[in-house]
């Protein structure tokens, strides 16, 4: 079930009414409703893969219970190993089996040995990377005794399968989300209204910005050999705003929907394209994943405590693993490698935590210095996105080679330039709105709250009208494939 579908528009009100009006006085029944709704939401896509969510739920619930009573450190490590093996084994099979098989065959072919092995026609379950990492965080935190294991299977099932963020995050920590299933929720109008505003802005990001940009990004990337360097640059820019509008739009809808049900999820995007260096960018982009890798991989590897060699090693590991997390393709690994290269100079010079505040805080415009840093960081990010979007390494290199030519200084030309110009105008307006709200949880969080009701609701109507009038051709959320 897609957030931008009629099905979801009907699904949420039904759940909302049952949740707040029929079951409002029974916490256990509310949690059970969330489990049923979540399984229905996921099964709408393919009911067969519900078994994978159920397996992860049962395994980690059982592991958590066992860890509570087990004091022998060797046995505790064994229990954690079982959890890691089962969860990562399932993820590895569905997501990486064919990748490793194909590369294994290619490696032997390079040395003149032919191996015959058939790839499997494996369907990648939607959201498997997200809920796998979410349930793993529970087992690891229980193992480290940072979290007391739950005895409530329904609450734990709701935590693992919570439908607003099930298939594309944010990746919630058990320490934040799980306790919310134990506490009686009371309906708050202000929280629900805020959730609706965030859903509205998320839909605008997805339908107006991402879907329109996707049309031209796909056109240019899929036919890159025939376009000028200036057109290829424009294609990379279209994808840059597509992936941001698509993914952060999903997160906004997920967080807003959660607030309708009385839950608070962590912010997943914090205006990353206004970052002044790559370190700041990664504190603001896909926050739930970057902090997951920081806490469960980077710090256990030693973090930044050692010398420069250890810092460099650990940085490459987390960025390359992060790239590989996104998909079974060398393009994602190169994308991760590039970001590591961007990040390391800041790390070894101890400048990776220079920009912890909001850019141009309290000011209308950034300084020339701030603007130059933003543009440099943005340009590096756009370049890396080329590898992320390309079909393979060869495609990415040819795309970059096409940019580096005299045709870079020509006027972009491709079919649909008039519609593309409309999209560019929409992106500019969108960027200005994001800039004015860059110190908030989302761009329109406080916009119009002090206006009179007529003006405020007129703004909402304008955004809603823009979704219907300027919405692009329906595109699947990019991160569903991860």
Image (cartoon, rainbow, N blue to C red):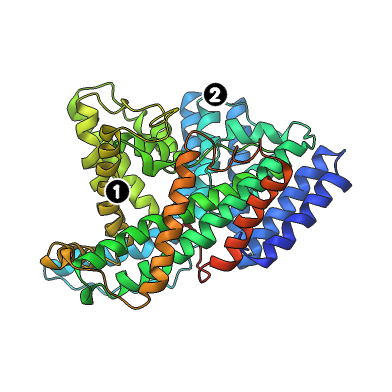
Q: Which mark is residue 381?
A: 1
Rendered view: 366 above or below 354: below
From the top left corner, tell me how far across and down residue 258 is, in percent: 66, 44
Q: CA distance from mark 2 to mark 1?
A: 38 Å
Secondary structure category for the residue under label 1: helix
Q: Is residue 17 left or right of residue 205?
A: right
Specify the quadrant of the image occupied by residue 445: top right
For the point 25% across and 41% down, the residue is 340
Nearer-N-terminus badge (2/1): 2
Q: x, y percentage for residue 155?
A: 71, 40
Judge left or right: residue 297 versus residue 440: left
Between 104 and 372, the one nearer to me in the picture? 372
Q: Would you say residue 337 is visible in this rendering?
A: no
Mark 1 surroundings within 10 Å by alpha-carbon count, few (fewer than 14), some (14 through 19), many (20 or more): some
Q: Is residue 10 left or right of residue 459?
A: right
Q: Which residue is mark 2?
A: 145
Q: Nearer the viewer, mark 2 or mark 1?
A: 1
- Residue 151: x and y in percent read 71, 33
Is residue 56 or residue 388 the one in the foreground?
A: 388
Q: Nearer the viewer, residue 481 or 98?
A: 481
């Amino acid at each position: 079930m897609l957030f931008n579908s009629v099905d979801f528009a009907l699904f949420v009100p039904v759940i909302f009414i049952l949740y707040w009006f029929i079951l409002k006085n029974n916490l256990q029944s509310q949690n059970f409703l969330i489990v049923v709704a979540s399984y229905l939401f996921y099964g709408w896509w393919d009911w067969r893969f519900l078994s994978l969510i159920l397996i992860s739920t049962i395994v980690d619930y059982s592991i958590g219970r066992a860890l509570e009573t087990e004091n022998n450190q060797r046995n505790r490590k064994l229990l954690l190993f079982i959890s890691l093996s089962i969860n990562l084994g399932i993820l590895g099979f569905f997501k990486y089996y064919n990748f490793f098989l194909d590369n294994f065959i290619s490696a032997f072919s390079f040395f003149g040995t032919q191996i015959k092995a058939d790839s499997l026609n494996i369907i990648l379950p939607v959201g498997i990377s997200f809920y796998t990492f979410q349930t793993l965080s529970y087992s690891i935190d229980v193992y480290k005794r940072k979290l007391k294991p739950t005895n409530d299977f329904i609450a734990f099932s709701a935590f693992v399968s919570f439908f607003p963020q099930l298939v594309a995050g944010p990746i919630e920590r058990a320490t934040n989300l799980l306790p919310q299933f134990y506490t009686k929720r009371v309906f708050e109008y202000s929280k629900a209204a805020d959730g609706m505003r965030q859903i509205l802005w998320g839909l605008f990001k997805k339908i107006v910005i991402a879907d329109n940009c996707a049309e031209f990004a796909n056109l240019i990337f899929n036919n890159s050999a025939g376009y000028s360097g200036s057109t290829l640059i424009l294609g990379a820019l279209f994808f840059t705003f597509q992936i941001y509008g698509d993914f952060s739009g999903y997160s906004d809808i997920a967080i807003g929907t959660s607030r309708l049900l009385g839950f608070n999820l962590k912010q997943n995007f914090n205006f990353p394209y206004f970052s002044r260096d790559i370190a700041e960018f990664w504190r603001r982009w896909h926050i739930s994943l970057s902090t997951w890798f920081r806490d469960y991989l980077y710090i256990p590897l030693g973090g930044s405590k050692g010398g420069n060699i250890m810092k460099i090693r650990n940085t490459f590991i987390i960025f390359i693993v992060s790239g590989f997390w996104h998909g079974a393709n060398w393009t994602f690994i190169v994308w991760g490698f590039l970001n590591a290269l961007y990040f390391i100079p800041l790390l070894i010079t101890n400048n990776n935590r220079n920009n912890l505040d909001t850019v141009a805080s309290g000011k209308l415009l950034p300084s020339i210095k701030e603007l130059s840093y933003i543009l440099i960081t943005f340009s590096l990010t756009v370049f890396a996105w080329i590898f992320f979007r390309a079909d393979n390494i060869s495609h990415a290199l040819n795309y970059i080679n096409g940019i580096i030519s005299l045709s870079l200084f020509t006027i972009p030309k491709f079919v649909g330039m008039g519609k593309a110009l409309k999209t560019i105008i929409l992106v500019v307006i969108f960027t200005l709105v994001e800039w004015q709200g860059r110190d908030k949880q989302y761009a329109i969080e406080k916009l119009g709250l002090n206006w009179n009701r007529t003006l405020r609701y007129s703004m909402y109507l304008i955004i809603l009208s823009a979704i219907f009038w300027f919405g692009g051709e329906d595109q699947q959320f990019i991160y569903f494939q991860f």
